[in-house]
Image (cartoon, grey):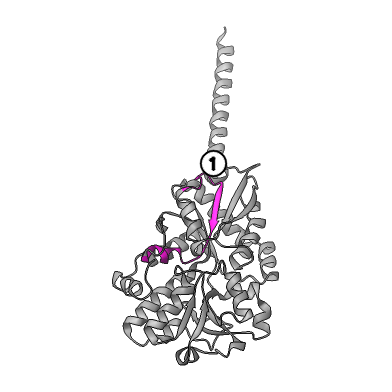
C-alpha cells in the first residue's frame, strides 16, 4: 500500500470518527433536553385514575375532566379510565394507593384534601404516611363551607347557638363531622351530627328533603359545580367558611378563624384552615421513581395551562387555581409540621376514631 493511499484511509477514518463523535454529542444534548420523554413512554398504555369518593360529587366531576385531557400531555398519549373508591372520607382510597397500587405509573389517585390532616391527628384507619406520596399537583384552593338549607330557618352561626341544628355527615372521620363538633366544644353551637350517610351526594339529598338542616362541610367549588341552581336560587345559607381567605362569592360569610374566642381556639382553627389549600390533589404511590413523578408533574402542569382544558372546566363550573407538585408537597410538609400542642388540642375536642 502506498503512502498516498495510507494517508487517504487515515483521513477517512478521522472523518468517520469525528462524525460519530458529533452524532453522539447531538444525541446526548437531545437526551439532556428531554430526559422525561426519553425515559418514559406510555404508548398503548391505560392509566387508572382512582377517585376517593362516590360518583356524582365535586371530586368526581374534576377527576373525569382530568381523565379526559391528561393523556394528551403525557408521552405516548395514554388513555385514562376512572375508578371510584369511596370509603371513610377518602381514607380507603389513600390506604390502597399507599399499600397496594403499582408504582409504575399505571395508577394515579385523587381524594379528599384532608389526608395530611387525618395523618397528623391519626384519625380513622389511616395507614399511610402523607409525606411519602408522590404529590403531582392540585387543581383548586377553594374554601370549605358549612351550609344550611335556607328553608330550615338556620341562617347563621348564632342560630346554631340558640337551638339544636341537625347536620349530615358520613362518619366521625372527616371534616363533615369535625367542623361542627369543634364548634360545639369551642363556642357552644348546638349541632346534632347524624352520621352514616354513604356519600356527600346522599347528604345533599337529605338536606334538600329536610331530613337534616346542614351539610357539615363541602368545598365551595363543589357547590358551584354540582348545584349552581342552589346558589342562584339562594337555597343554601353558608354559615362559615374554612380557608386562608374568604371566597370572593362569600364576602359576608365569616371564616372559621373569625369565630375563635381565645388564642388557643384561633391556633386550632388556623391549623384546620391550612389544610384546605390543596383541594383536588393528585398523587402517585410512594416509591414511584423520581423520573416518573417528574413526567406526571410536567404533564399535569401543561394540562392546567391548556386553553381547551380550561374552557371545558369553565363550562362545567369547575374553579381552577392550580398548585404545582413542589408547592403542593411544601404545603403538605407545613401541615405535617403543625405544633403538636395544637394538634393535641384538636384531637381532644373531636377525637381520632
Q: Which residue is mark 1?
A: 39
Q: Is residue 100 visible?
A: yes
> At which x and y percent is residue 352?
37, 67
> At which x and y percent is residue 351?
37, 71
Label 1: state its secondary structure: helix
Q: Residue at x 33, y 71 (%)?
A: 343
* Total number of numbered discs in the rendering: 1
Q: Is residue 318 magenta?
A: no
Quadrant in the picture for the C terminus: bottom left
Quadrant in the picture for the N terminus: top right
Question: Considering only vertical position in the picture, is 66 above or below 143?
Answer: above
Q: Residue at x 59, y 54 (%)?
A: 49
In the image shown, does 239 or 323 lie closer to the viewer? 239
Magenta stretch bounds = 100-121
> At which x and y percent is residue 255?
47, 83
In the image shown, does 138 or 2 lie closer to the viewer? 138
Question: Considering only vertical position in the picture, is 300 above or below 194?
Answer: above
In the image shown, does 28 or 278 lie closer to the viewer? 278
Sort mark 1 into few (<14), some (14-19) or many (20+) by Cα contacts within 10 Å: few
Q: Quadrant of residue 173?
A: bottom left
Amino acid at each position: 500500500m502506498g503512502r498516498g493511499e495510507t494517508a487517504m484511509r487515515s483521513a477517512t477514518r478521522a472523518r468517520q470518527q469525528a462524525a460519530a463523535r458529533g452524532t453522539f454529542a447531538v444525541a446526548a444534548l437531545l437526551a439532556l433536553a428531554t430526559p422525561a420523554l426519553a425515559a418514559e413512554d406510555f404508548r398503548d398504555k391505560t392509566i387508572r385514575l382512582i377517585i376517593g369518593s362516590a360518583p356524582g360529587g365535586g371530586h368526581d366531576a374534576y377527576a373525569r375532566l382530568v381523565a379526559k385531557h391528561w393523556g394528551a400531555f403525557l408521552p405516548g398519549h395514554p388513555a385514562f379510565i376512572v375508578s371510584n373508591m369511596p370509603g371513610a372520607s377518602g381514607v380507603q382510597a389513600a390506604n390502597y394507593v399507599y399499600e397496594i397500587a403499582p408504582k409504575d405509573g399505571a395508577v394515579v389517585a385523587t381524594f379528599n384534601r384532608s389526608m395530611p390532616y387525618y395523618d397528623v391527628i391519626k384519625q380513622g384507619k389511616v395507614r399511610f404516611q402523607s409525606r411519602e406520596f408522590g404529590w403531582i399537583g392540585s387543581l383548586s384552593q377553594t374554601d370549605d363551607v358549612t351550609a344550611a338549607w335556607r328553608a330550615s330557618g338556620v341562617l347563621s352561626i348564632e342560630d346554631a347557638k340558640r337551638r339544636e341544628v341537625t347536620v349530615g355527615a358520613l362518619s366521625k372521620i372527616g371534616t363533615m363531622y369535625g367542623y361542627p363538633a369543634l364548634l360545639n366544644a369551642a363556642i357552644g353551637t348546638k349541632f346534632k351530627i347524624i352520621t352514616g350517610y354513604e356519600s356527600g351526594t346522599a347528604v345533599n339529598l337529605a338536606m334538600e328533603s329536610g331530613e337534616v338542616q346542614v351539610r357539615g362541610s363541602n368545598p365551595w367549588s363543589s357547590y358551584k359545580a354540582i348545584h349552581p341552581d342552589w346558589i342562584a336560587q339562594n337555597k343554601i345559607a353558608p354559615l362559615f367558611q374554612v380557608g386562608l381567605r374568604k371566597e370572593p362569592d362569600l364576602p359576608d360569610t365569616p371564616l372559621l378563624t373569625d369565630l375563635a374566642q381565645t388564642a388557643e381556639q384561633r391556633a386550632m382553627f388556623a391549623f384546620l384552615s391550612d389544610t384546605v389549600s390543596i383541594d383536588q390533589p393528585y398523587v402517585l404511590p410512594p416509591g414511584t421513581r423520581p423520573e416518573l413523578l417528574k413526567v406526571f408533574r410536567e404533564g399535569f402542569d401543561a394540562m392546567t395551562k391548556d386553553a381547551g382544558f380550561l374552557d371545558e372546566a369553565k363550562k362545567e363550573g369547575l374553579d381552577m387555581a392550580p398548585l404545582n407538585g413542589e408547592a403542593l408537597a411544601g404545603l403538605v410538609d407545613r401541615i405535617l409540621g403543625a405544633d403538636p400542642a395544637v394538634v393535641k388540642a384538636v384531637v381532644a375536642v373531636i377525637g381520632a376514631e
